[in-house]
Image (tube, helix red, strand yellow):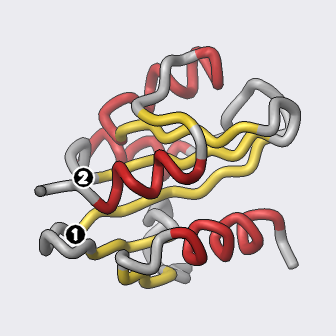
Amino acid sequence: MKLESKFYNELKRITPQIRWTRIENTSVFGTPDLLGYNDSGRFFTVELKVSRSNKVRLSPHQIAFHVTHPKNSFILVKSLAASTVKLYEGSDVKQLVACGLELEACCLGLAACGLHLSSLGA
């Protein structure tokens, strides 16, 4: 199983209050991995990334998606080197690419990130 698939399963397990749709899209490049819907009726997208270093690799299409859709879009990064999970808002995508995991995240830790996504729109 790929690292991002394992990461998705971890996220899904700790967020039963969010209905997740895994997006497998080969037609429109840059589409995020997940569409979430929380109990407040809020839709949002999440790009999952697993990083072995401080750098977060995003394709030009993924960057363009978050630049075009800066609200209710997120990038969730699991750092294998630091054993941390960080959540970034889509509006921060350019800074994330430039600064890597040194950029301050809006949430730290998988549980806190799940809670943040659950409470969107509340």
Residue 14 located left or right of residue 85 = left
Q: Position of residue 15 (x, y in %)?
A: 47, 71
Q: Are marks 1 and 2 in contact (CB under 8 Å)?
A: yes
Q: Position of residue 121 (x, y in %)?
A: 12, 56
The quarter of the image holding the C terminus is bottom left
Circle 1: residue type:
Phe
Which residue was labeled with disc 2? 72
Q: Position of residue 14 (x, y in %)?
A: 55, 69
Question: Vertically, is 1 above or below 76?
Answer: below
The quarter of the image holding the N terminus is bottom right
Seen at 36% across and 38% down, the residue is 89
**Disc with the residue nearer the chain's start (1 vs 2):** 1
Q: Tag 1, which secondary structure? A: strand
Question: Vertically, is 47 above or below 23?
Answer: above
Circle 2: residue type:
Asn
Report the number of numbered marks.
2
Which residue was labeled with disc 1? 43
Q: Could you classify mark 1 by the number of other residues whose Cα lies within 10 Å: few (under 14), some (14-19), or many (20 or more)?
A: some
Q: CA distance from mark 1 to mark 2?
A: 7 Å
Q: Nearer the viewer, residue 5 or 120?
A: 120
Residue 28 circle label: none
Q: Nearer the viewer, residue 56 or 10?
A: 10
Q: Nearer the viewer, residue 118 or 1?
A: 118
Q: Could you classify mark 2 by the number of other residues whose Cα lies within 10 Å: few (under 14), some (14-19), or many (20 or more)?
A: some
